[in-house]
Image (tube, rainbow, N blue to C red):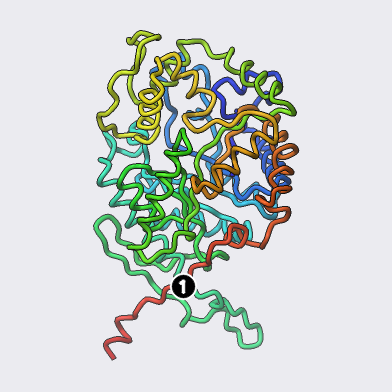
Amino acid sequence: MTSLIGLGSHLAGWRHPDAWSHTSMNLDHAIQIAKLAERGKFDLLFLADGNAVRQMDKPELFAANSRSDRPAVFEPLTLLAALSQHTSHIGLFATATTTYDEPYLLARRFASLDHLSKGRACWNIVTGSYAGDSVNFGRAEHVPRGERYARAREFVQVCMGLWDSWAEDAFIEDKATGRYLDPGKVQRLDHEGRFFSVQGPLNVARPPQGYPLLFTAGQSEEGREMAAELAEGLFSVCTTKQEAQEFYADIKARMAKYGRAPDALRILPGCTIYVGRSEAEAEELYEELQALIVPSLGVAYLSKFCEADLSGYPLDGPLPDLSAEVAGVASYRQAIAEMARRDVLTIRQTYQRVVPSLGHVLFKGNPIQIADQMEDWYRGKACDGFNIDMPVLPRCLRDFVDLVVPELQRRGLFRTEYAGGTLRETMGLARPARRIRARPDLAAE
C-alpha cells in the first residue's frame, strides 16, 4: 500500500529538486501515482483525510505545508472515483470518519465507489482524532473517546446492514415480463440504536465485494478491540520489529472471541523507505532531506505528533513526560515517547528520527538491503505487509517499483500479476455473505 499525497512523506520532501511542483489539488499527479503503483502491483492506494485546515495557530508549521496537515485536498471518494477510471486492479482506499458523518450517506458513497471501480473500494474507519474538526460540525468541543468508539461500532454495523439491502440478483431487468426488480429480494434495515435510527434500504445495489474492505487505525485498547471485531485491515505504528511482533500477536489473539480466524485481518505497519541503486545513493537522499529541516520546524512537527508543546524545553534535553491521555491520536505519542526513552534521545535527536519516517519504522539502503528488512519483518510475524511512505514523489515510488519490487518478486514474496478482479480477491479475503433479516410481518403469521 502507498499514499496518494503528492507532497511526499518527508516533511521537506516537496522541496527536493526531484519532487513535483504545483502539488495542491493536482489530479494529473494523482493519476500518475495510481498508474505507477499499479505497475508495481501494489494492493492499495491510500488517501488520508480530515475535516479542517490545521495548524493555523502555528505559523511556521502551517507555512511548511506539512504532508500530514494537507491544507487543500480533494474530497477522498470524489478523487478515488476519478482514479477508478484510470486503473483496473489497485484498491482505492479512503479515510472517512464515523464521528462527523451519517451511516446512510457514507454507505451510499462507498457502495457507489465499489460499483464504479468494479469491486475495489476500501474504507479506513476513523473516529476523528483532531479536536479542531468539531467546530466545523456545530460542536464547541470534540466528542469524548469512549463515545466516539461506541458510535463507530454502531455506525459500521448500520453500514453493513445497508450494504445487505439488496440480493445480488435483485435487479432482474426482464424486458419480456416488464419486471425490473424482484421485490422479494430487498430488505429494510429498521435499525434503532443509541446513536442512529435508519430505516433503509440503501438506494444502491449490493456492492460487488459485498462490503468494501474495512480498515481501522486505532492502537488504543478500544481501537484494538474494534479491529479484532470488525476490521479486515489494520494500520500499526511500531518503531521496532519487537514492538510490531507484540502488536501483531496481540491483535491476532483477540480475534477468536469474535469468531474470526487470524488470517481474516491484515496488519500493515507504516514504513518509510529510502532506496538507492547503492547504499550511498540512499544515504545521500536521506541527508539531503534532513538538511532541509531547521530545528524550529523539527520541534514544531514533533510537538504536533506528541500533542504537546515542546518549544519551551531544551533542544538537547529529554522529552517531558507524555504519559497523560490525550483526545487525539495516542499511538504516535506513545510510540515516540517509548522510542525516546528506550534509546535515550534528546528532543533534537527525536525529531531527527521522526521527521524522515513520520514516526514509523525506516528502511534505508540498496534494493537487496530493503528487501532483506521487509522479508525479516514479514517472516518474523511482525506484519502481513506494509503501508509504504515515499519521501519524495515521484522519484521514490518509481525507484521502489523499479528496484525493490523485482527483488521481492524474485524471492517469491510478492505477486507478479494481480490474482483477481476485486480487491478482496487480490488480497485473499473472503467476500461477506448477505445477512438476511427476519421480517416481523412474516414471523407473526
Q: Residue at x 42, y 15 (%)?
A: 299
Quarter of the figure that contains the C terminus = bottom left
Name of the residue lying farthest toward the bottom: 445
- Tell me, yes or no, if residue 254 can be seen here: yes
Question: How many numbered marks are there?
Answer: 1
Q: Position of residue 347 (x, y in %)?
A: 40, 15
As displayed, is residue 434 above or below residue 224? below
Up/down of 6 relative to 148, above or below: above
**SS label for mark 1:** loop
| Residue 153, percent from left and from top | 33, 55
The percent position of residue 229, horizontal first and vertical second, equals 37, 58
Q: Identify the residue position indicated by label 1 in the image.
A: 434
- Which quadrant: the N terminus? top right
Residue 354 location in percent, x, y?
48, 24
Q: Residue at image x 27%, y 40%?
A: 143
Q: Relative to residue 261, is residue 114 drawn left or right? A: right
Identify the residue shown where x is 57% and y is 29%.
Answer: 9
| 120 over 309 or under it: above or below | below
Query: How would you rate the neighbour count of disc 1 (Cα within 10 Å): few for under 14, some for 14-19, many for 20 or more?
Result: some
* 223 vs 65, nearest the viewer: 223
